Amino acid sequence: MSTGVPAPASQRTLGDERVIGVTKAPPAERYDFFRVIQGYLEEAARHAVVPDHVRQILSQPKNELIVHFPVRMDNGEYRLFKGYRIQHSNILGPFKGGMRYHESAGLDDFKALAAMMTWKCSLMNLPFGGAKGGIKFDPRAVSRGELQRVTRRFFHALGSNIGPDYDIPAPDVGTNAQTMAWALDTYINTVGMVKKEAAMGVVTGKPVSSGGTFGRETATGKGVVHCIVEWARRSRFKLEGKKLIVQGFGNVGSNTAVLLANHGVSLVAVGDHTGYLYNPEGFNVHRLKQYVEQNGSIAGYANGQKISREEFFAVQADVFVPAALENQIGPIEAEALQVRLVAEGANGPCSPEGEAVLLRRGIDLLPDVLANAGGVTVSYYEWVQNRRSEQWTVEEVEERLETAMLDAYERMAQFAKTHSCSNRIACYGVSLGRLVQVYLDREIFP
Ligand code: NAD
């Protein structure tokens, strides 16, 4: 079944060393993620009247913050960490975006991801701007105590550069509700706030017991599934009995797979940073999710046959949900895929060249800016609840989320139809329209 597909450039080292077991790959050509995101903005701008100054403002983040901070490790030694917070735009409201802990994360990735948050919040009509940040390190390679100290020192170093009315972080790759609980506690204890209750909204994605909202843990997966179900309805495609493949089985990937199982869609291939598994009968997604929660990855899960990354991309299925990292679907992967739909759970999983191949082959694509926007949407609900000292029911949160996702889907579909463009450019076009209007209303200070 091997197609001889190499890993995309930015992933080669990780893939070859860890998964395939080959010695170090040659230096990879750098994938300019920020440039890619800017390219989408420029393409969308062709479908709208965008004043030159607005284009210039949006072409760079407003603030780029880099902090270095020492952490005492378990062996008594000190290690210096590098943390980032990129604040792209706050014209629509406070900066908003996740914190990523990953060994290959860097300034360019955070700039791209921060800009994407601006587009996402604008598309979803949220009163937020865009930001992203994190630390360049492997959170799996440190103890729980070290992880807590790294998190606390990082948020301490950020100080009042974040805040419930200024910049509101959330979980992303390598971080979770526990990370946000440590972040909240550090913020409350170090930044002098008279009203501690008001400080709860400094981060979202917190545990429910610490001011989180019901429904945030599953929100991104739920949003992906609402988009897939809506796509199926509009395409007259019956989901029941169909097959799914998922790359990345963390928060987004596992919740999407579990929720799609409720629609009769079975997961037949799955992959993460440790490798790929295939089960033509369909995995028991609940058991697989539980296994990953206990063991940290799919490695060693018994009910699946090990396959290579190349074989994974060539598995016969109907829907593919990339839910790991950016730049995973280049032209070679896009040629190999045997599905009807790619729904981007991850941010930036398709390269522009990969997307062009998918579209040429008639494979539909639901872009990240819409498909994974359920996370930030429910983060907004969490922030509103914190401001009002309220706790909404899970039903209330999920009902609002479904309406928000379907409304945004309709905005994308309308724009794509009117302007004869791809779904991705339609999302950027809608977002840009809202941003341009705000700049036209308010003009530039002074
Ligand atoms: P996570 O840390 O919970 O899971 C990440 C998954 O990706 C893990 O299964 C990991 O093993 C896998 N992975 C990492 N490197 C890999 C590699 N080289 N090859 C294959 N798999 C690899 O993270 P998450 O929160 O699920 O985020 C996943 C994606 O979804 C990211 O792009 C993130 O920006 C995006 N996203 C997340 C949220 C959210 O609410 N968590 C919201 C919107 C978008």
Image (cartoon, helix red, strand yellow):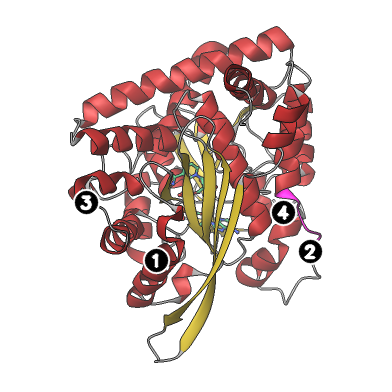
Residue identified by numbered label 4: 2
Mark 1 and mark 2 in contact? Answer it, CB < 8 Å.
no
Q: Residues within 10 Å of mark 4 (few under 14, many from 20)?
A: few
Residue identified by numbered label 2: 28
Q: Secondary structure at mark 1?
A: helix
Location of the C terminus by quadrant is top right
- Estimate the x, y position of residue 443 in percent, counting from the top left: 62, 23
The span from disc 3 to disc 1 (Cα, nearest Å) is 18 Å
Point 19% across, 30% down: residue? 393
The boundaries of the magenta stretch are 29-33
The span from disc 3 to disc 4 (Cα, nearest Å) is 61 Å
Foreground mark, 1 or 2, reads: 1
Residue identified by numbered label 1: 156
Q: Which mark is residue 194?
A: 3
Asked if residue 31 is among those painted magenta in the image, a careful observer would answer: yes
Foreground mark, 3 or 1, reads: 3
The residue type indicated by label 2 comes to Ala
Please state which of residues 306 and 393 is positioned toward the viewer in this rendering.
Answer: 393
Asked if residue 76 is among those painted magenta in the image, a careful observer would answer: no
Foreground mark, 2 or 4, reads: 2
Give whichever of discs 2 and 3 has the lower sequence position.
2
Mark 2 and mark 3 in contact? Answer it, CB < 8 Å.
no
